[in-house]
Image (tube, rainbow, N blue to C red):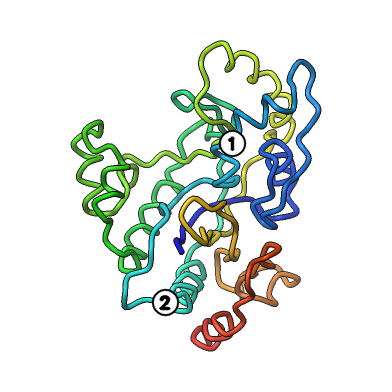
Amino acid sequence: MRYAICFTPPMGDPLSAAAASWLGRSVYSGEPVELPALAGLAVSEVAFHTAVPRRFGFHAMIMAPFRLAPDMDEAQLLKALMLFTSAEAPFEIERMEVARLSQCFGLVPAVPSQAMHLLAARVVQAFDRFRAPLGEDEIERADPDRLTAPQFTNLHRWGDPYVMDEYRFHMKLTGPLNADVGRRLEPALRGLFEPLLSGPLRIESLALFVEPETGAPMRVHSQHPLGKISARPRGDKTRRFTEVPPAQGDAVRPSLLAAALRAGR
């Protein structure tokens, strides 16, 4: 089992629905979603080029997937995440846009967000104690020979090359594409997502993601709203976090949830 701390819009957000349709899988239910019919693109072509982000689900990574340290358990992680998010204030990223991310396409801030950058750094610092050290195979998968000196330092200190000054907030929508395929997919991506990006992106929660076993699709375990309950709108004060129902076939773990709630009193 691995965990990750990410941002993803709420389940009912139109951006979540569009991303689930494009990627062919809901990051909340874990279930397949029918891919959209797009002019000039076969469904099989879209499915092929979205295979990598489909497994990880629609998200912006904040703390990369990690195994729990031997002296930590899920209830302790949930308690710490609830306490952490209650001390953080919601904020907005003024505008997101469809853009190239090296060889991929994704959503990125039109202007870098200092608030998001600082939040990401605080998450990595606060939850590093929950992370088991990387194994030799995990370090090798990070391809350390291709990292810059700061990225190499981050890999060994924080378990992820792309944190702190190397962090870039982004939400990936495709795997690597050559130039010709990129030109074919870009109009469809813009047509699907740009109508949903006219307003700011509200950063109002963090999501705990889980990967049940190596290579399994990741999905949202629970959403944790930012800010103190007393400061939130009246209709939004009933729960400190929302546990997402398990995907079909997943085991329900009420004992862990109950333990976290008792610990968070």
Position in image of residue 124 (x %, y %) = 35, 57
Answer above or below: position of 238 versus 61. Answer: below
Residue 79 in picture, x, y percent from top left = 48, 77
Q: Examine the rendered structure and indicate whether residue 68 appears above or below residue 8.
A: below
**Count of picture labels:** 2
* Spot occupied by residue 150 in the image (x, y as percentages of width and height): 22, 39
Q: Residue drawn 59% across and 16% down?
A: 181
- Which residue is pictured at 76% across the width and 35% down the height? 35
Mark 1 or mark 2, earlier in chain? 1
Mark 1 surroundings: few (<14), some (14-19) or many (≥20) residues within 10 A: some
In this figure, which residue is indicated by the disc labeled 1? 51
Q: Is residue 178 above or below residue 150?
A: above
Q: Secondary structure at mark 1?
A: helix
In this rendering, position of residue 82 left or right of residue 47: left
Q: Position of residue 108 (x, y in %)?
A: 53, 34
Which residue is identified by label 2? 73
Identity, as a three-letter code, of the amino acid under mark 2: Asp
| Callout 1–callout 2 Cβ contact below 8 Å | no
Instruction: Choose between 206 and 91: the one closer to the eye.
Output: 206
Q: CA distance from mark 1 to mark 2?
A: 31 Å
Q: Is residue 228 left or right of residue 133?
A: right
Residue shown at 32% from the left, 70% from the top: 69
